[in-house]
Each structure stands twice: as C-alpha cells, then as structure tokens.
Image (cartoon, rainbow, N blue to C red):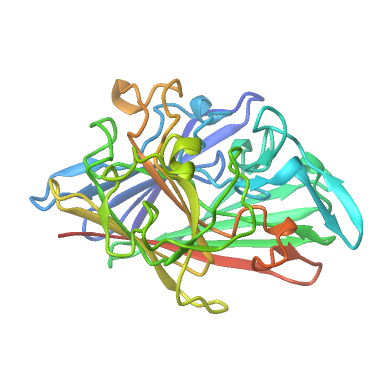
Amino acid sequence: MNIEVKTWGLSPDGKEIKLYTMTNGNGIQVQLCDIGAGIVSILTPDRNGKMDDIVLGYPDPLSYYGDGPCAGKVPGRFANRIAGGRFKIDETEYQLDLNTGDGKHHLHGGRIGFANQKWASRIEGESVVFTYLSADGEAGYPGELVAKARYTLNDENELNLRLGAWTTATTVVNLTNHTYFNLKGEGQGDILDHQLQLNASRWLPATEELITTGEIAPVAGTPMDFTEGKRIGRDIREPFPALVNGKGYDSCWVLDNLGKDKLNLAATLSHEGTGRMVQLYTTQPGVQVYTGNWLSGCPQGKNGHVYHDYEGVALECQALPDAPNKPNFPNTFLRPGEEYKEIIIFKFSTI
C-alpha cells in the first residue's frame, strides 16, 4: 500500500491543508484531508474494471469549511441530534450550541463542530492518522477531549477507520463518518436506483423535528424495512411520517446481533448497472441512513458537478441519536481514564 501527501491549500487562517492519497495493490485509491479528518475521494472499479470516484465532495479545501452536507467528514463531539442541545451529567445540565430545527436543537457538534476544524495529521506506517484537541467548553461540552481517526487501506479492498477519544472530564461522545456514496460515480445522477440492505430489524421513530422519541420500533410492515434489501427509491415517496418529515430517509436503524466491541455487518449498498458494492462493518450500535434529501445548494462538486437532492447516500455508523437523554439507549458518556473506541470498515467489491 502506497501513501502520498501534498499541500492542497491553506485554511482561512493560513494553515497548510494536506491531501493524502492512499493506493492499494489493486489500484483502489482513497484521498483524505485535514478538514474534519475527511474522505475526499474513493476510486473503485466497476464490474468491467472502469475506475470512478464514488463519493461526493469538492475540488478545493475551502469548500469543506461549513458545508451543510458535512461531506466525507467526521462530525462531533456528538454526531446527529441532541434535543434542545441539553443533557445532564450528575445533575449538572449542559447547554450546547443550537444549530438545527430553527435554532431549537444541536446537530453534529454545533455551528462549527469537529467537521469544520483542521485536524493534525501524519502518516504512521500504512495508516493516515488525524487528531483533534477539543477545548473544555467548546460548543458547550464539558472536558478537554482528544479525538483520533486512523484510516488504513488494505489489499482486501477494505478501508478501515478506527475512531478514538479521551477526556479530562465526563462528557458525551459520538463519532462517525459522513461520506456520501454514489456507486455510479459522483455527479452521475441520483441514488434512488441503488440497492440497500440493512442488518437491522428495528429503527428509531422521531418527531417532526427529527428528534428520536425513545421508542425502538420493528421495521416489519413499514417502508423502513431494508432487511431483505430493496431499491432506495422504491418506498421513498410513501406517506409515512418519517419519510414526509425528512423528505426522504433520514433515520437511524438499530443493528441486530450487537455485542460489546463486536464487529457487525451494518449495511450493503450496491448498484446493478455498474456492479459496484460497498459493505459497512462496525462496532457501533446504529446506522443513520440519509439519502441526500437537501443536497441542492451545497458547494459545487468535483469536476464541475452541481449536486442535487438524492445524488448521494450517507450510511453513518454511530451511537443512537439523543442517547444522552434516552436512558434506554446504549451509553455515550465518556469518563476520565476511559477510552472511546469504535471501528467502521468500508469493504469494496463488485457483483
């Protein structure tokens, strides 16, 4: 596996932004950048060997700052939504940035968040490692937190992402990766013809403002059922509350066969026309599926492409949304002396 690094540009405050290119022995190529420890591009072959970039992104580093879609990046300190931006630790209530739901709720770490920060980066063996130091009180979170994202590409065509964090005071943590996939190639139309299968027989209903209610509901008999696999677009226009409120899929599924530190198949995404397939394995308890329902108006994409709604699907392996306020959800509190560690693996192949 080969790794190259170059200067891609400068941050708004004049700091060097690095672009890393990882290439495995089969010619699969992954590009990463310092902004949000983000995935910039992934080149994989179709069933005929034609290489295409299968993730959405931008041609320049400055477009990655403050983009609404959070393309390719690691959001945090807590990915997804926290109701009212509030939670308690030992009866002390903390108020976070409010940046979604007309200023009522907290999303992806707030107005700035980890995704819009420059992370420190380095090559370490056959991996690219990103680290970010989040100050005590940043976006309202308690404790100084060190976050780490390690990417490794192997010759089994797996991109392995290991996420870690350590804190000086009890806090909450939920890290994920927010890459948008289009297996036809970025900028090549919508993803409604993609086939999606989820290893999840339960999902999380939410309010009109997409705040989880605390209920863990069966998917059987609803448009949220992907247990056998189906086209993403098959039921997306159904008058089902979650689909109406989100203008498409923007919900979290609870993965089956969970176990502490157990690596679990979460999702399989494929496209019949190109034969491309990506499978996601994770130690996380949930996967948020977002079908790019509000992509229109984001920064111009690579190769001059203008992205429209539904042109990418994000499969975000993560903790359950609003877990700090839902005692029945798996724990997301991190205490001094503990290590947060989760794994996400993207495995590329063809059918």
Q: Is residue 237 shown above or below 266? A: above
Visible residue check, residue 26: yes
Residue 237 x %, y %: 34, 37
Front-lying residue, 305 or 216: 216
Left or right of residue 179, residue 108 in this image: right
Q: At 14% from the left edge and 47% from the top edge, which residue is drawn?
A: 274
Q: Quadrant of the C terminus?
A: bottom left
Front-lying residue, 191 or 328: 328
Q: At 24% from the left edge and 31% from the top edge, which residue is drawn?
A: 189
Q: Residue furthest left?
A: 48
Q: Is residue 337 shown above or below 273? A: below
Left or right of residue 267, residue 205 in this image: right
**Residue 107 falls in image quadrant:** top right
Residue 281 x %, y %: 41, 66
Residue 289 x %, y %: 44, 49
**Residue 328 falls in image quadrant:** bottom right
Q: At 64% from the left edge and 53% from the top edge, which residue is drawn?
A: 213
Front-lying residue, 159 or 194: 194
Left or right of residue 259, residue 292 in this image: left
Q: Quadrant of the N terminus?
A: bottom left
Visible residue check, residue 125: no
Front-lying residue, 291 or 123: 291
Left or right of residue 297, residue 332 in this image: right
Q: At 51% from the left edge and 70% from the top edge, which residue is drawn?
A: 283
